[in-house]
Image (tube, helix red, strand yellow):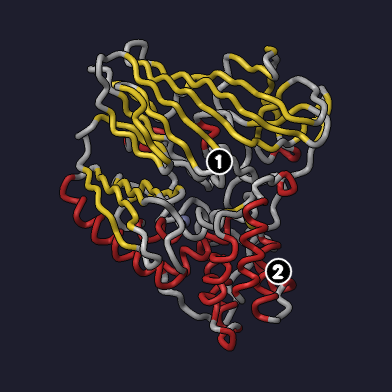
Amino acid sequence: MKPFLILIFMIFAAQSWANLHLAPPDFNIPEGRAVFVDFTDSHHHIVFDGKKRKAIATSTITFFNTKPGMPIFDLLETPSLVEIDGEAVGQKLINLPGGESEVRVVLKHLAPGVHTLKVVNEIKKNVRFTLFRNVKAGFWIRDLKSRMFWEQYLPVNLEYDQHARTMDIEFKGRKIHNQAVHANGKVERTSVNTWRIEYPAWYTVSAPYFHTLKVGSKPTVNFNVKSIDGRNVPFTIYTSFPWRVSTFTKEAIKVFHELESDYGPYPHDSLIAYGSGFGGMEHAGATQTSLGALDHEMLHFYFAKGVLPANGNAGWIDEAIARWRDDGYPTRYAPGVPANLAGRSIYARNTNSQAYAHGSHFLSYLDSMMQNVGGMKAFLRGYFQAYKYTLVTTDHFINNLEFFTGMSLRQMFIENVFTPTPEKTLEMHGDHAHPEMTEEMLEALL
Ligand SMILES: [Zn+2]
């Protein structure tokens, strides 16, 4: 892509965090019209009380709605208090149209404008208190099922929304809490037992990383790695198994350089890799992962958490790219088995697990048709650099690919990624990089 085009895209990107145009359609429920809104910032005050053995979050969210109606948000736990503009109101768990997933709606009809939502809830998932009132908490996410992003812990919006997010963390129950706080934002210890984390304004609900544990409970190394753009990027590597730290470190540095050479400067301010032994999930420049999936998750620092999917129907793109890299970027001359990766309900929030096999096969087929313009990797490099920190849809991907190649590709996408697989074939239950994990397994990662 030409430099002036990249500049235009970047100017557009800076203003594009108001993403209401990417929200699914509003809809009616018996109480009235439920409307999607745009969060502009959220503040979460989280108290981890080692004595009461409870974690309570008080969130204050500024949002605006452009249409009259009852604002939609999401939170897995039932909140103990909801207020709009200082007034206590009811809320309700409702189905998205077609039963695709669930969300919560505030039972108050609002005129268009700027409003404040306050929510109090207990955080029950992936929090543990030790006998000595130390805290273990990890806000893990998963993307192959709905409602497994940060709605597991805090009131949030759907994936289409990008906004600034501040967390004030307070530990209670000990005179001094020696907690390590790992987060992919600006982390500051504000007093003996309080920390503040400020996450970048371009983060979505699936981008932030937060893990706290007692200092020294897992072996940790901190060091800098020089980026091709001259920055010293701070790395934090910690693992469940002491002997794994150096192996993780070597692999992380190797893959960091590979990805910078293929796609350009690393798009995050720091890199966190938690070698948890199981599974793998990517956040923005942070991952909880097995050693075998570390490279896959790091690819997602560019595609998934550098360029971000706007919804569940866009989630296949980054898994297809990641798997294509896992396989060594093969070129294939047949498109493979079609699957409905991108044409599910407009309310879909999760990624279709067929994205890995079917999606990567389709990309490697497109690659064979793009050899005269440098192949799929050349396109992906430009696509990443033009759209990093912004949200993309499958339509956006097709349009840019057609622009880059000069070919009409839409029909081919319709036949290959908008078509249900004729028979159940591959990988309906997760992937080697993102295997399905039980609640107990996720909690064991703390
Ligand atoms: Zn993946």
User: Residue 358 at what x, y percent from top left?
Assistant: 56, 66
| Residue 262: image location, x then y, percent | 43, 72
**Foreground pick, 375 / 383:** 383
Q: Toward which corner of the image does residue 400 lie, by quadrant?
A: bottom right
**Quarter of the figure with residue 229:** bottom left
Point out the image quarter for the N terminus: bottom right
Name the residue type under label 2. Answer: Asn
Mark 1 residue element: loop
Q: Going by the image, does 276 lie left or right of 347?
A: left
Q: Residue 399 got which mark?
A: 2
Label 1 sits on what residue type? Val
- Kindly check if marks 2 and 1 are in contact, taking CB atoms under 8 A apart as contact: no
Pointer 1 residue: 205
Mark 1 or mark 2, which is nearer the start of the sequence?
1
Q: Residues within 10 Å of mark 1 (few under 14, many from 20)?
A: many
Q: Which mark is residue 443?
A: none
Comparing 365 with 334, the one in front is 365
Give me the residue at 58% from left, 41% from top: 146
Taking the view exactly as shown, the residue that stands out farthest to the bottom is 372
Q: Secondary structure at mark 2?
A: helix
User: Residue 381: x, y in percent?
Assistant: 52, 71
What crowding class fits label 2: few (fewer than 14 Cα within 10 Å), some (14-19), or many (20 or more)? some
